[in-house]
Image: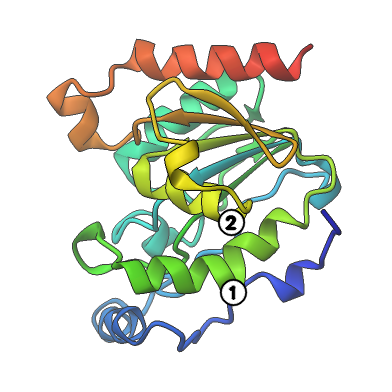
Amino acid sequence: MTPVSARETEPPRDCPLCPRLHQFIADWRAREPEWHNAPVPTFLPEGGDDAVAFLIVGLAPGLRGANKTGRPFTGDYAGDLLYSTLKTFGFARGNYEAQPDDSLSLVDTAIINAVRCVPPENKPVGAEINTCRQHFFAPTLKRFKNLRAVLTLGVIAHQSTVRALGGRVAAHPFTHGGHQELAGLAIFSSYHCSRYNTNTGRLTEEMFVSVFRDIRAFLDK
């Protein structure tokens, strides 16, 4: 993959490509003018694009999480579980305090959402997923020349990643704890670390930790 610049892959603050999401954000800007209320940029490690060996792909910003704070998985329960697990396996350091100016930093890891803007009821529609993938997500993957492993959180993030890498979803189905090879990358998959999934028992902390244990072992080879 030929590396491209961040300027080519990060959506502008007032991205108009998905009218429904654009209007939803505009409504929340009026209600909560101090919030981020804009496309959420990729969260990068201290070394920038070239340091990224591991990429985590979520679905979309949470309304009172990343949409409020401007950093992926920051400000909601999913971030509590994700960042504590990242620290356990050496993918992050510092203290996670659910705000973008805390001391947390990533180590050789980047985090992105398949859809950059918050969707109503946390449910982007197919056209929005496709538009964001074509304009921002797929090009972002080309930025990381040292990328080796990708973790997809949930079915939509997984399918969008497969398509962004030129694969067929039918040939690379989502399974929790899955590990597949595509476009020279190791694609791992997990149920999303949402409160709903953990409360219902679909995803336990040990299940989540087990996925990261596999990723750490792969990257340490």
Mark nearest the camera among 1 and 2 is 2
Crowd class of label 1 (few under 14; some 14 to 19; many from 20; radius 10 Å): some
Image: 207 above or below 42: above
| Nearest to N terminus: mark 1 or mark 2 | 1
Q: Which mark is residue 135?
A: 1
Q: Which image quadrant is residue 8 in?
A: bottom right
Horizontally, residue 187 falls left or right of residue 46, namely: left
Q: Nearer the viewer, residue 46 or 11?
A: 11
Say which quadrant the C terminus sits in.
top right
Instruction: Residue under label 2, please give it.
Output: 164
| Amino acid at pointer 2 | Ala
Where residue 49 sits: x, y (%)? 80, 51
Q: Which mark is residue 59?
A: none
| Residue 58 visible to an observer of this rendering | no
**What kind of element bears circle 1?**
helix
| Residue 95 visible to an observer of this rendering | yes
Q: Nearer the viewer, residue 15 or 3?
A: 3
Q: Are marks 1 and 2 in contact (CB under 8 Å)?
A: no
Where residue 158 sits: x, y (%)? 45, 43
